[in-house]
């Protein structure tokens, strides 16, 4: 039967033998070990495994216990994949049209780069490059791809906006391109490196012990949790690292090469081909962010309080964190829910919860059976459950779609390790921002970046609870995506503050410095958010049509998180920084008491 090897990150063939089969296999391995022979496994006349036998097979000198298992039917995976492909193509068409209208040639080159980036990430996941074995593309993995593509869009928007600013100063196209890429690079570098820090920590925390980073982290900060391997979080981290690398390759170096090459031809030296028109271009209007900081703080406090209060409406914690079992069945026609419940409880001798839903196929439905369980659900119990339902409802074509089982101890360890990993990443990010932005009081900038991030995480949590979604692995995927998105947004603002601090008069008040900088980055933030938010809305609509709850529970909270991240990066983090600096100056100017 099929199985998945988490350490090797690949599908394997598993053998299940009865007593006579065990004896026969032991005899065969003893004979082959003596002659240096091998035992092979064939499927459809194709050899899928040919293992050399070094010793006789026998009982292991220790016992093995599965802490979590997951089985997914091809029908369920195909439906989710179909929904993601359709929504991805729609979103790509929207982004392409959006970038072409706004930026013309840079927009076209950006679309080419994004397609190349997406292809490169899929190639990396499939193991095409050779340095990494192929892996299963999970929803968190898809989240990593979406965040990376979003970063790629952001990279191109930052650069294109900088080019338009230089053209507005009267520079030629070639000089504007050169200056635009130079001015945009620091923000792109810092944003992508912070993402890489988060991704590497996640890969180290939840990878296998063949990874040197994992070995180091497991021996230090994650030692109390033991070797906890979670493929879906590792998948998120890996796709994110691949995206960061490809973002520099496609979004910076390749895009610059293509733009600069085209600009050498006279036909491509018109500013209008780069999205700039003297008649329609509007200079940035300085908004009063600093003066409205109290209003922003009140709004943020209300949103946080409202999100926290959703907890009292009831929080559904999935088995990923608390332990338990969920088995999903597909069926046609109608089932007697009460009779099903009674039959399953008689087999398991434990209370169960049943939930009905619709499948991807309009002619079939889904029945979810969930329950807390102190011990692992045996294969015999699973087979008995299926056999009983098929016997009771022979005309309903009952089949297993998906089964997930997590032990309570494994759930607690996973949740604890997630919390520690996020805290560790936050500490490293504060240190990085402190060093990179030390000229604008980097330590406070780093701390307020994390404060803004907490605001986004709490609001995202509230949206999960408000929409009735379970706190599960998708919840972690959304939080990790918002983690990277929010920090990148805030760093773009800080980067402009750092730049303007050099350009403006040294006597410019801190509040005015932030007003100018936040106003200059607002257009970029809105345009980046539009592309990412449109992608999430598209995914949500398609997931609703196909009834893909797993994807819906990712895309809807992501939309809330993106809005919260845009607000906090523009209105909370920089104004908190203003408040802190003004407070410090007031303290310094206060006369000493006699």
Image (spheres, rainbow, N blue to C red):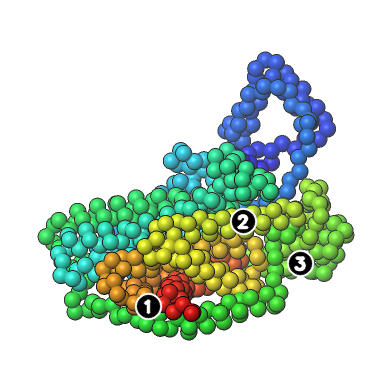
Answer yes or no: is residue 333 visible: no
Q: Secondary structure at mark 2?
A: helix
Q: Is residue 271 visible?
A: yes
Asked whether the residues under the numbered discs 1 and 3 touch, taking CB atoms below 8 Å apart as contact, a structural biologist would say no
Q: Residues within 10 Å of mark 3 (few under 14, many from 20)?
A: some
Q: Residue at x 30, y 75 (%)?
A: 508
Q: Quadrant of the N terminus?
A: top right
Q: Are marks 2 and 3 in contact (CB under 8 Å)?
A: no
Q: Position of residue 234 (x, y in %)?
A: 56, 50
Question: To which residue does mark 2 refer?
Answer: 420
Tally the numbered discs: 3
Question: For the residues carrying marks 1 and 3, which lies nearer the camera in this image?
Answer: 1
Residue ID for mark 1: 511
Determine whether the residue tagged by mark 3 lies in a helix, strand or loop: strand
Tell me the residue at 44%/79% (across/down): 591
Check disc 3 and report the residue beneath it: 354
- The crowding category of the residue bearing disc 1, from other C-alpha atoms within 10 Å (few below 14, some 14 to 19, many at least 20), is many
Disc 2 versus disc 1: nearer the observer: 1
- Taking 70 as reference, is 444 above or below it? below
Horizontal side of residue 33 vs 452, given as left or right = right
316 versus 74 height, above or below? below
Of all residues, the one furthest to the top in this rendering is 35
Q: CA distance from mark 2 to mark 3?
A: 34 Å
Where residue 273 sits, quadrant-wise, is bottom left
Q: Is residue 90 left or right of residue 180?
A: right
Q: Position of residue 166 (x, y in %)?
A: 21, 67
Which of pointers 2 and 1 lies earlier in the amino acid sequence?
Answer: 2
Percent from the top left, x then y, of residue 478? Answer: 55, 63
Label 1 residue SS: helix
Question: Left or right: where does residue 145 sit relative to residue 465?
Answer: left
In 3D space, how far apart are the residues under numbered discs 2 and 1 (Cα atoms)?
A: 35 Å
Horizontal and vertical percent for residue 143?
51, 59
């Amino acid at each position: 039967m099929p199985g998945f090897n988490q350490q090797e990150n690949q599908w394997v063939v598993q053998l299940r033998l009865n007593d006579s089969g065990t004896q026969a296999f032991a005899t065969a391995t003893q004979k082959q070990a003596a002659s240096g022979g091998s035992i092979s496994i064939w499927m459809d006349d194709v050899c899928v495994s040919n293992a050399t036998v070094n010793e006789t097979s026998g009982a292991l000198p220790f016992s093995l216990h599965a802490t979590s298992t997951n089985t997914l039917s091809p029908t369920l995976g195909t439906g989710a994949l179909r929904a993601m492909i359709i929504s991805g193509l729609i979103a790509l068409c929207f982004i392409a049209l959006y970038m072409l209208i706004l930026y013309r040639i840079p927009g076209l080159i950006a679309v080419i780069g994004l397609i190349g980036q997406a292809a490169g990430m899929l190639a990396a996941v499939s193991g095409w490059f050779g340095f990494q074995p192929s892996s299963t593309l999970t929803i968190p993995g898809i989240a990593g791809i979406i965040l990376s593509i979003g970063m790629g869009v952001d990279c191109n928007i930052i650069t294109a906006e900088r080019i338009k600013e230089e053209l507005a100063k009267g520079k030629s196209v070639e000089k504007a391109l050169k200056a635009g890429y130079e001015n945009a690079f620091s923000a792109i570098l810092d944003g992508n490196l912070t993402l890489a820090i988060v991704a590497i920590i996640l890969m180290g925390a939840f990878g296998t012990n063949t990874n040197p980073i994992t070995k180091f982290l497991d021996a230090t900060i994650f030692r109390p949790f033991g070797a906890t391997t979670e493929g879906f979080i590792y998948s998120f981290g890996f796709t994110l690292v691949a995206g960061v690398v490809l973002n520099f390759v496609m979004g910076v170096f390749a895009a610059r090469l293509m733009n600069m090459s085209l600009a050498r031809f006279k036909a491509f030296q018109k500013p209008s081909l780069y999205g700039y028109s003297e008649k329609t271009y509007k200079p940035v209007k300085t908004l009063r962010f600093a003066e409205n900081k109290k209003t922003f703080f009140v709004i943020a406090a209300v949103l946080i309080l409202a999100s926290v209060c959703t907890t009292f409406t009831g929080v559904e914690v999935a088995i990923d964190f608390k332990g338990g079992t969920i088995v999903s069945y597909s069926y046609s026609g109608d089932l007697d829910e009460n009779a099903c419940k009674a039959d399953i409880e008689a087999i398991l001798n434990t209370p169960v919860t049943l939930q009905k839903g619709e499948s991807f196929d309009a002619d079939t439905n889904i029945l979810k059976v969930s329950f807390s369980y102190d011990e692992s659900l045996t294969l015999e119990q699973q087979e008995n459950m299926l056999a009983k339902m098929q016997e009771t409802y022979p005309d309903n074509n009952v089949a297993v779609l998906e089964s997930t089982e997590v032990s309570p101890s494994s759930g607690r360890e996973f949740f604890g390790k997630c919390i520690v990993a996020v805290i560790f990443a936050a500490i490293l990010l504060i240190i990085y921002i402190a060093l990179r932005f030390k000229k604008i009081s980097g330590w406070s900038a780093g701390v307020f970046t994390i404060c803004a991030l907490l605001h986004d995480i709490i609001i995202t949590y509230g949206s999960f609870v408000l929409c009735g979604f379970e706190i599960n692995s998708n919840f972690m995927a959304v939080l990790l995506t918002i983690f990277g998105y929010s920090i990148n947004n805030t760093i773009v603002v800080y980067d402009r503050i750092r730049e303007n601090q050099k350009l403006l008069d040294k006597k410019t008040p801190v509040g005015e410095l932030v007003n100018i900088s936040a106003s200059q980055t607002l257009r970029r933030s809105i345009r980046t958010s539009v592309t990412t938010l449109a992608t999430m809305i598209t995914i949500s609509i398609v997931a609703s049509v196909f009834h893909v709850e797993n994807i819906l529970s990712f895309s809807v909270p992501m939309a809330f998180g993106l809005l919260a991240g845009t607000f906090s990066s523009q209105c909370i983090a920089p104004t908190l920084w203003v408040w802190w600096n003004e407070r410090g100056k007031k303290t310094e100017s206060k006369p000493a008491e006699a």
